């Protein structure tokens, strides 16, 4: 055994194997090794290879639902995306809840529209067959979601659209949109 003098207190203490054992036990309480982990570790040491761990049914269900919701949000955005090519305001309207509100800017001018006015504006612009789009991100939390979609060459403009969506009665729809035309802002 070694004796150790703590410099700030002048107290002499003994560092013993029992103290080290106590620390090891405390570490096991904080970071317990499960039986499965111990078995995997033993197999790794024995064979030199790792085995894969199966995820729980609950985790698998959560992952499947998350993927399914992501795909459903992409599908909910499609009528809007397609209306950019077609110039069909009625098609645009189908992607939104009736209460939806649209705010943004075109050529630096502030625009504040209800859904009917916005859909009429899409129709008045007409088709943009060469428009390209990219869904930059989708973020989902339960029945609420947000998405960012970039467009280039929609009526000669580059647009960034931010959407908020909601899943009601099993169907995702756009509740609101904020956008920027990237020109004169």
Image (tube, rainbow, N blue to C red):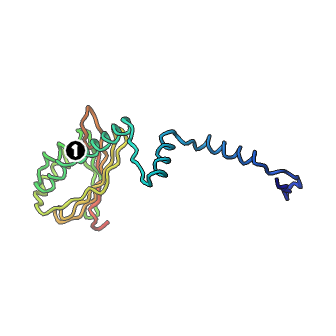
Does 139 sit left or right of 170 as displayed?
right
The quadrant of the picture occupied by the C terminus is bottom left
Q: Position of residue 146 (x, y in %)?
A: 33, 48
Q: Is residue 159 above or below residue 99?
A: below
- Front-most of residues 68 and 126: 68
**Depicted 57 relative to depicted 123: above or below:** above
176 on left or right of 25: left
The residue located at (83%, 55%) in the rendering is 2
Depth check, front residue: 164 or 62? 62
Q: Residue furthest front?
A: 46
Q: Residues within 10 Å of mark 1 (few under 14, many from 20)?
A: many
- x and y percentages locating residue 75 in the rendered image: 21, 46
Residue 66: image quadrant is: top left
Residue hosting label 1: 76
Describe residue 86's horizontal placement relative to residue 7 as left or right: left
Q: Under tag 1, what secondary structure?
A: helix
> What's the residue at 10%, 58% (across, down)?
127
Residue occupying image coordinates x 82% and y 53%:
1
Residue at position x 22%, y 48% in the image: 77
Instruction: Find residue 72 and report its horizontal and vertical position in percent.
Output: 24, 43
């Amino acid at each position: 055994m070694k004796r150790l003098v703590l410099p700030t207190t002048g107290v002499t203490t003994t560092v013993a194997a029992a103290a080290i054992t106590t620390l090891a036990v405390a570490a096991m309480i904080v970071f317990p090794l499960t039986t499965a982990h111990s078995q995997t570790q033993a197999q790794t040491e024995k064979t030199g290879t790792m085995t894969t761990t199966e995820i729980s049914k609950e985790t698998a269900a959560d992952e499947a639902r998350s993927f399914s919701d992501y795909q459903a949000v992409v599908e909910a955005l499609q009528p809007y995306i397609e209306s950019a090519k077609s110039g069909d305001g009625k098609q645009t309207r189908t992607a939104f809840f009736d209460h939806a509100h649209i705010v943004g800017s075109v050529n630096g001018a502030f625009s504040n529209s209800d859904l009917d006015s916005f859909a009429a504006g899409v129709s008045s612009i007409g088709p943009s067959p060469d428009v390209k789009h990219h869904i930059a991100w989708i973020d989902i939390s339960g029945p609420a979601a947000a998405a960012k979609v970039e467009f280039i060459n929609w009526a000669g403009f580059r647009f960034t659209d931010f959407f908020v969506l909601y899943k009601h009665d099993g169907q995702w729809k756009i509740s609101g949109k904020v956008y920027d035309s990237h020109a004169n802002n």
